[in-house]
Image (spheres, rainbow, N blue to C red):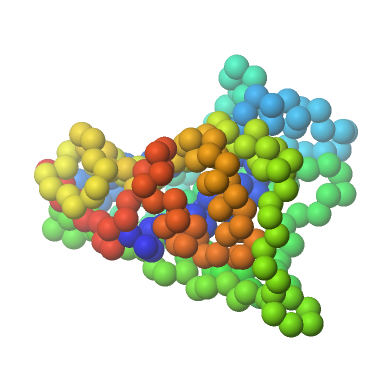
Amino acid sequence: MKTTLNFLCAGLLALLTSSCLEHSATIRLNKDGSGTITEETVFSAEASAMMAQMPPGGSGPKFDDPKKAAAAATKMGEGVTVEKVEKIDKDGRIGGRVVFKFQDINKVKFTYGEAMSDSAKDMGPPGAPGDAPDAEGGKPENKPMTFKYEGGVLTLVNPEPEAAAKKPAEGGDAPDAAEPDPQALAMMQGVFKDMKMSLKVEIVDGIAETNATHVEGNTVTLMDMAFGKLLANPEHMKKLSAMQMEESSPAEVAAAFKGVEGMKIETKDSVTVKVK
């Protein structure tokens, strides 16, 4: 679904800015409309080591900060609360896991990756600036995914985000995009070769019927992306770099790589799931 691609890619861009390498979100729905949302982010061993070497006064992402988790829950809608906040520190990799609880999925507004990217906003050396707002107001609004659950049928609703205003170059039209620097592409490949992202919906009581493309057991996969397979191809990397320079929309970026091995993305206009 085009709107799902917009939604997921917007979340992807937010997570890329915080340098996370693995992020997963699982929405679990009970038959009565209640459930949980679990978001987990884990940094690579290399990134974890770099954060551990920050100078005194620097700060790492506060994944176990109850206040940040509570603020994220408030953004998700009425009745959403924090069930659990955990810090992950295993095998040289650090990260965090937050479990949110909701009573009625109809009231939930979910933005992929927002809880974890908010937790990482304060990371950096002392005196480093945070995320500055877009002075031109050209940044598109990242609208949340909402849900409709009625008569045992769940429908995922993905509003079309507003398009970013593309800025022309000073003195006239924007010049043609330059050929990406090979050294920069090599660095990009090294940084993101192990990056993985996923978004899944799990129906606790089982799925009776669905029009979703990727279904296994009681789980619908809306996105499962292994960036190593994408970035291993130099042509894919050049295309991604060029589209970034052109400020292509998230939907355009996702559509350009549809069908690439390692990229599993739901493309239907609407996804419905009937609960058993």
Q: In x, y percent, where is residue 138? A: 64, 74
Q: Residue at x 71, y 43 (%)?
A: 182
Give 22 or 64, whichever is nearer the viewer. Answer: 22
Q: Residue furthest bottom?
A: 172
Q: Residue at x 58, y 72 (%)?
A: 164
Q: Residue at x 38, y 63 (%)?
A: 3
Q: Is residue 20 visible to us here?
A: yes
Q: In x, y percent, where is residue 87? A: 59, 30
Q: Residue at x 76, y 30 (%)?
A: 50
Residue 216 in the figure: left or right of residue 99: left
Q: Residue furthest top?
A: 91
Residue 77 in the figure: left or right of residue 85: left
- In the figure, 168 relative to 134: above or below? below
Q: Quadrant of the C terminus?
A: top left
Give 162 or 55, whichever is nearer the viewer. Answer: 162
Q: In x, y percent, where is residue 190? A: 65, 33
Give 263 or 20, whichever is nearer the viewer. Answer: 263
Q: Quadrant of the N terminus?
A: bottom left
Residue 6 in the figure: left or right of residue 45: left
Q: How many marks?
A: 0
- In the figure, 268 relative to 233: above or below? below
Q: In x, y percent, where is residue 253? A: 49, 57
Q: Is residue 74 visible to us here?
A: no
Quarter holding residue 166: bottom right
Give 48 or 120, whichever is nearer the viewer. Answer: 48
